[in-house]
Amino acid sequence: MGIAAGCASAHQGVRHDTADDRNRKLKLYARDGICEYWIVNLTDAQLEVYRDPSGERYNTAFTVKNETQTAMAFPEDAIDWM
């Protein structure tokens, strides 16, 4: 599931395969200036976080597993990730 947060928001249904989220959607959201993009990777039980869009990519990318994560758009709401 990809969740874009920032100036705009886009919520997608849960899917087993995240290839489209990492390729087509990531490029689209970066190009449109979505400040932060999250992919909930259920297969690997981790959260993939992409920040700082530039062109069709994100300059910062990291994974979260067994940690608390805060979205840039909602800093007051921390999420405990698995």
Image (cartoon, rainbow, N blue to C red):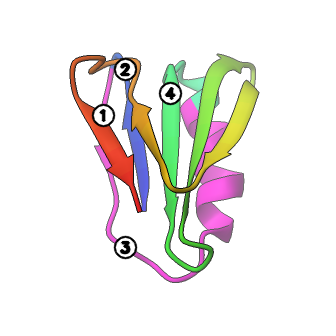
Q: Which of 25 and 2 is in front in this view?
A: 2
Quick one: quadrant of the N terminus?
A: bottom left
Q: Position of residue 65 (x, y in %)?
A: 57, 55
Q: Classify residue 30 as left or right of residue 10.
A: right
Question: Which residue position is annotated with label 4?
Answer: 36
* For residue 27, side relative to residue 68 (left or right): right
Marks 3/1 in contact by CB < 8 Å: the verdict is no
Residue matched to label 1:
9
Number of marks present in the image shown: 4
Q: Answer with the quarter of the image where residue 55 lies.
A: top right
Give yes or no for contact between labels 3 and 2 (Cβ–Cβ under 8 Å): no
Determine whether label 1 and label 4 are within 8 Å by CB: no
Q: Residues under labels 1 and 4: Cα distance?
A: 10 Å
State which mark lies toward you, 1 or 4.
4
Q: Which of marks 3 and 1 is nearer the N terminus?
A: 1
Kindly identify which residue carries mark 2. 6
**Residues at marks 1 and 2 touching, judged by CB atoms closer than 8 Å:** yes
Res 30 → quadrant: top right
Q: Where is residue 68 in the image (x, y as percent from the top left)?
A: 42, 40
